[in-house]
Structure formats: structure tokens, C-alpha cells
Amino acid sequence: MWSHIVDRFHAYYTKVKLSNGRTILRKSKTLDKKRLSGVLKDARKGLKYLQRANDGHIQNLGTVLDMTYARVGKRRRQLIAKLQAPDLLPDDASVAALSAEMSRAPRAKRVPELTDELLALLKSQVKQDSSRFTRAPLRGISPKVPTVNIWQRKFPEKRRVNFIRAWYAKTLDRLMPPLGADEWERLRGLATGEIRSDGPVPRRKTGTTEAGASQDPVYRVALRDLPYRLTSSTERVVEKKQHPETVSRPHELTPRFMRKMWANVFEKCPQLEWNNEWKKWNVTWGNVRKQADLVFDSQKAVPPDVFDGVDRHGQLLVQDMVEPLPPSL
């Protein structure tokens, strides 16, 4: 989120065509001023979103955690792009064969193919419960291309290629990319409580640095010009009580609450591991919901009459029911 806000303030350049026919990039002051208002609006919106996440609003906090662990956003698309690379051996023969195949087929007739990692991931995700994912459920691992059109003629080749491309793009949009081994293990530790989190960093006083010195005047003016006041979490709770219809209910960021939030994200994160014995990819999904079995101590004998006087539903038998007392005069 921080890098996203910073990138929005990069200088805006436009293409300008010179008299000699050359095209250069030149910074436009007029467009830069117009764009600055929109960029400031987006930055304030992102800052407000982070504030609500730190205050414990479940929807905002869940979205920030999904962006952190590549369930949504730019990093998710980057991880999927790595899976789209073809599986090639590091030799010249494989590269030459792929280049020759791509040169023979025109670009309009090229059909995207699933790599071994994508295919293993698709087969595993189809079997999972899609209600916990942030994307639409997968319908299958291969496109169902019709053989004939509505006139019972052969399906056109161009439409077949476009049909497969559309299915490929829709499938990648619904795919949950795998995390690295280190990141997946750390998320598992946070979800199970094995790794203790320090919680959010306490906010410093407005207008001071870590050393206690005052901030730059420009920074103070920027804070003053914000469309909302940087209030504390306690004040926002009071605002919730005064205006319950405008603000969602915050939640205290306790260790138990954070383990639950990390567990929700962990269930959406798979891990890919190569099995040398079977020569295939194994997919492991995060799961921290384990049912506890009832374990009886064998050293302590249960008395045989512990369930006497009740039926199998736990109700008292008729002969053992206590007679009601007579009404008082």
C-alpha cells in the first residue's frame, strides 16, 4: 500500500511531437496540476483505508492482509505471471524448438497452454471449498469448445482460438497463486499462534519525530489540509457510538482476533512442492481448523452408574422424575 501511494506521485509526462518529427516525453505543468488533485484524493483514500484497518475494521483489515499475501492486487498478478512461463530445460535445443514452433504459428492462431504448475494448481483448487476464496469458483480445468455453431457447421478456427483465450484469462483471474516456502511457513505460524506478533506500531504524536523534534512546516501544513482529522482509535470508537449508521464497528486487535484473521488468509494460500519420487507437483493448502478428539484418561475408571436414570437423549426417565411440590396456601 505504501509503494502504491508513492508511485501515484511520480512525475506525469506526455508525448510531444517536435517540428522535425521526433517524439519526446515532456513534463506538462497543466496536466500535472490537474492530476495532482486526483492523486491526493487517492492517497488520502488509501491512508484512511489503512487507518480503518489498524482500528480493527474487519473488512478493511482483511483486504490489507489479502494484498500483503498476494490474494488480490498487483503482487498476485506477478506471482501468476511466474507460473505462466513454459517449463524448459536449460539447454539450447529446447529454446530453439520453442522459437521454431512460435515462428511457424501466426500470432492470431496461437493458443495459450497451461504449464505443469498451473495444471496441478487448477486440479487442486477445483476440489477446495470456493466459499472462502476472494475470487469466483473454478468450473473446470479445460475449456469446453463447441464443435459446431448454431447452423450446425464446423466451429470457425478464429472463434475457437478466441474462446480458449477468454477461458484462459478467466481461469487465471480466479486462480489462487502459491506462496514461497518461507512466507507460507511464517503465515502458518502466525495463524496457529506458534509465532507471536508484536501488533501494530503505536502512533507517534502529531508534529513530532521519534527524537521528539518538530516536523517540517510543510508537513504540518499538509496534515492541516487533510479533509479529515487524524484522530485516535478511542475517539473513533466514541464517534461510532454517536453515529452508528455511518461507521462500521471496529474490533480490538487482540492476539486471538489476529490469529483468526491470519487463519482466514492462510486457508486461501497454497504451496507448490516438487515430488522427485513421483515426478509431479504437490499442492498443499493452509488449514488450521482441526477438530479436537475426546480423549479419555484410561487410568481413571468411569463409574458404571454415571448414566443411570437418563435415556440416550439425556432426558430423565419417568420413574426418576421428581414429583412437583403442592401449591402453597
Image: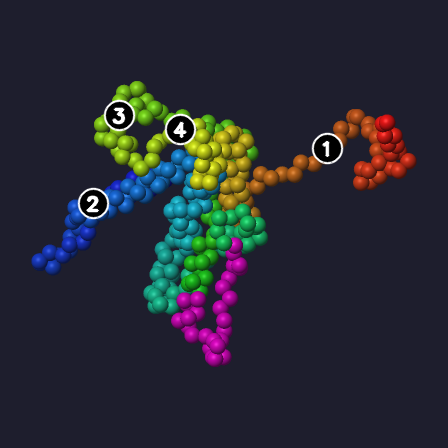
Question: Quadrant of residue 49 in the image?
Answer: top left
Q: What's the CA distance linking mark 4 and mark 2?
A: 32 Å
Q: Which residue is mark 1?
A: 295
Q: Are marks 1 and 3 in contact (CB under 8 Å)?
A: no
- Mark 3 vs mark 2, CA separation in Å: 26 Å
Q: Earlier in the sequence, mark 4 or mark 1?
A: 4
Q: Name the amino acid type tagged 2.
A: Lys
214 in the magenta segment: no
Q: Which residue is mark 4?
A: 232
What residue is drawn where x is 26% and y is 29%?
220
Residue drawn where x is 28% and y is 32% of the image:
223
Query: Magenta region, mostly helix, strand or loop?
Result: loop
Helix, strand or loop at mark 1:
loop
Q: Quadrant of the N terminus?
A: top left
Q: Which mark is residue 215?
A: 3
Q: Secondary structure at mark 3?
A: loop
Give the answer, above or below, for where 219 lies relative to 152.
above
Residue 25 in the image: x percent, y percent?
17, 50
The mark total stands at 4
Magenta-span inclusion, residue 152 = yes
> Against 304, is 160 above or below?
below
- The residue identified by callout 2 is 33
Please indicate, yes or no, whether residue 28 appears anywhere in the rendered image: yes
User: Reading the chain from its start, which is encountered first: label 4 or label 2?
Assistant: 2
Mark 4: amino acid: Ser
Q: Earlier in the sequence, mark 1 or mark 2?
A: 2
Residue type (three-letter) at the residue carrying disc 1:
Val
